[in-house]
Amino acid sequence: MRIERNSGPGGVQGGTSAGKAKGKRAPSSGSSDSVHVTDSASLREKAQVMLADMDAVRMERIEEIRDALEKGTFKSDSRKVATQIVCNALAEHPWS
């Protein structure tokens, strides 16, 4: 994928960077923009470590929810979900 800054809004264009070495970045005009691509194997390894640390009770609940989603029988309280999202966001970014 190539990102071109001079193409205006929505300047993301699909394509390959033939002839460029992997991991190298084209010279920029003093911009501090950067792109970081994480190896999928590294993400998979981190996920496995996180799953190994989870309680068995939580894994059972996750499996129950997954099954209900697949069957189309999962019900949720949107107000409760929204409240939890906001609480988690505020906990991650304290405003002090």
Image (cartoon, helix red, strand yellow):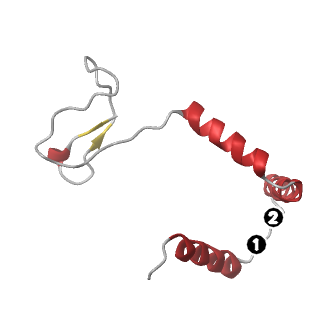
Q: Residue at x 67, y 74 (%)?
A: 81
Q: Position of residue 91 (x, y in %)?
A: 56, 74
Which residue was labeled with disc 2?
74
Q: Residue at x 42, y 38 (%)?
A: 37
Q: Amino acid at mark 2?
A: Phe
Element type at mark 2: loop
Farthest top residue in view: 19
Disc sitting over residue 17 in the figure: none
Which residue was labeled with disc 1?
76
Inter-mark Cα distance, 2 to 1:
7 Å
Quarter of the image for residue 78 reads bottom right
Q: Nearer the viewer, residue 88 or 52?
A: 52
- Which quarter of the image is occupied by the C terminus? bottom left
Residue 64 versus residue 95 in the image, above or below: above
Q: Is residue 3 left or right of residue 77?
A: left
Q: Amino acid at mark 1?
A: Ser
- Total marks placed: 2
Q: Position of residue 80 (x, y in %)?
A: 70, 79
Is there CB contact under 8 Å for labels 2 and 1? yes
Q: Nearer the viewer, residue 17 or 26?
A: 26
Q: Residue at x 62, y 77 (%)?
A: 82
Q: Residue at x 25, y 17 (%)?
A: 19
- Which quarter of the image is occupied by the N terminus? top left
Q: Position of residue 58 (x, y in %)?
A: 83, 59
